Amino acid sequence: MWLRHVYSGMAERVSAGERAGTGAAPTDDGTHDDEAGGDTADDGRRRRRADTDESAPRPDAPALAVDDISKSFGDGDDAVVAVDDVSFAVDRGSVVGLLGPNGAGKTTLIKSILGTVVPDSGTVRLFGVDAASDRRAAYADIDAMLEGARNDYWRLTVRENLRYFATIGGVDPDSVAARHDRLLDRLGLAEKADTPVRELSRGMKQKVSLASVLAGGAKLVFLDEPTLGLDVESSRTLRRELRRLADEDDLTVVLSSHDMDVVEAVCDRVIVVADGRILADDAVAALVSRASADVVEVASPDFEERTLVALDERFEVQSVTPAETGGRTRIEVAADGDELYALMDHLREAGVRIDDVRTRRPDLEDVFVDMTEPETERHEATAAVERQR
């Protein structure tokens, strides 16, 4: 658990590895275990905070509060604004998705929250504790699994990783052995418990990273592309476990992912970031409801240049897939209700023979693309028509 390496003074081994280029520090998620006897993660943290009562978490505070965070790189005209006056809060026990296109500022925002990047302005509070005032207390219950980082020790077995990360979190690993067994079982790692991590597939390593975070009892975790490298079944398993941990164990999760299926299945709320700013912050269902109309997909061999131009002028054509030699052109049009009838009438009058027609409701991915796509790229259909001229 990487943050605890950094902020509890136990970072010597990880820091040496990072300097040598052998890997970055550990991982994310955590939950407490009422069934495990003896030392618990909460007991360990209470002991570590015995002399810092003023920095103790407040029970009425949100898990995360970000206020007016900004961060730029470079100076003068060459300065790049990565995060621009961002504010939001995350309630305890909730799962919040952080979405944005590449270069939107997500990674810088996460690192600013975690303290690995120092923001130019703004404050971060974790369970009510100001991260700038008392970093050790603020990050005691926080972990993160970052994409591209070596989140585990590959020479150790799967179980040894769980025990190690529980230990550096201040927890007696024997006292949470039952929790580790459940994690290994639920994440499909039980049969590999005594296998060195370096011998596992990429997807299995990803699951070990998640299990290592959960092993120590963190209350707030940041997951960056947690399903990367996972097969379909493993991805479903991860979704179920994250949702269960949030619902049953009050775990708070901030999840950054390009996998919209995972975001829709797991997240209570979504924050969409672009150009360093928040474009939207709402429940998944509320965001999806912003879509203006259902999408109608029509395939025909009769779509000529003039027909496509006329369609684009009259309707909201979202995409055009040109036909292969002798094949059919496929178009997507936003249309429902009366617009759907008007579209069918228009195609009939234009002499377009419809080989295939389908309708689908917009999903989170449709809304996300519409919100974040640069203006010059929004009319892909028009560009496709122009290329055919």
Image: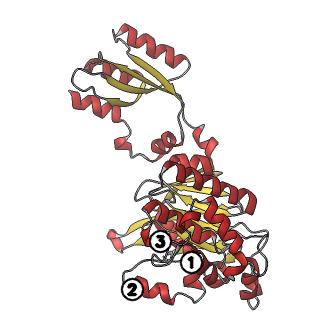
Q: How far is disc 2 from disc 3 in space, using C-alphas?
A: 21 Å
Q: Which residue is mark 2?
A: 19
Q: Quadrant of residue 271?
A: bottom right
Left or right? Give the position of 140 relative to 379.
right
Front residue of 167/219: it is 167
Q: Secondary structure at mark 2?
A: helix
Q: Counting other residues with Cα less than 10 Å from the Cα at mark 3, is it few (<14), some (14-19), or many (20 or more)?
A: many
Q: Residue at x 47, y 22 (%)?
A: 358
Q: Secondary structure at mark 1?
A: helix
Front residue of 9/277: it is 9
Q: What is the x, y in percent for residue 47?
A: 75, 87
Q: Which residue is mark 1?
A: 160
Q: What is the x, y in percent for residue 319?
A: 37, 32
Q: Quadrant of residue 315?
A: top left
Q: How far is disc 2 from disc 1 in space, using C-alphas?
A: 23 Å
| Amino acid type assigned to the residue bearing label 1 in the image | Glu
Q: Is residue 134 visible?
A: no
Q: What is the x, y in percent for residue 329?
A: 31, 23
Q: How far is disc 3 from disc 1 in space, using C-alphas?
A: 10 Å
Q: Residue at x 64, y 65 (%)?
A: 183
- Point out the tag, 2 or 1, that comes first from the N-terminus: 2
Whether residues under marks 2 and 3 lie with C-beta atoms below 8 angstroms apart, the answer is no
Marks 2, 3: nearer the viewer: 3
Marks 2, 1: nearer the viewer: 1
Q: Counting other residues with Cα less than 10 Å from the Cα at mark 1, is it few (<14), some (14-19), or many (20 or more)?
A: some
Front residue of 356/75: it is 356
Q: Secondary structure at mark 3?
A: helix
- Point out the tag, 2 or 3, that comes first from the N-terminus: 2
Relative to 169, say whether 149 is above or below. Answer: above
Q: Which mark is residue 179?
A: none
Q: Which residue is mark 3?
A: 197
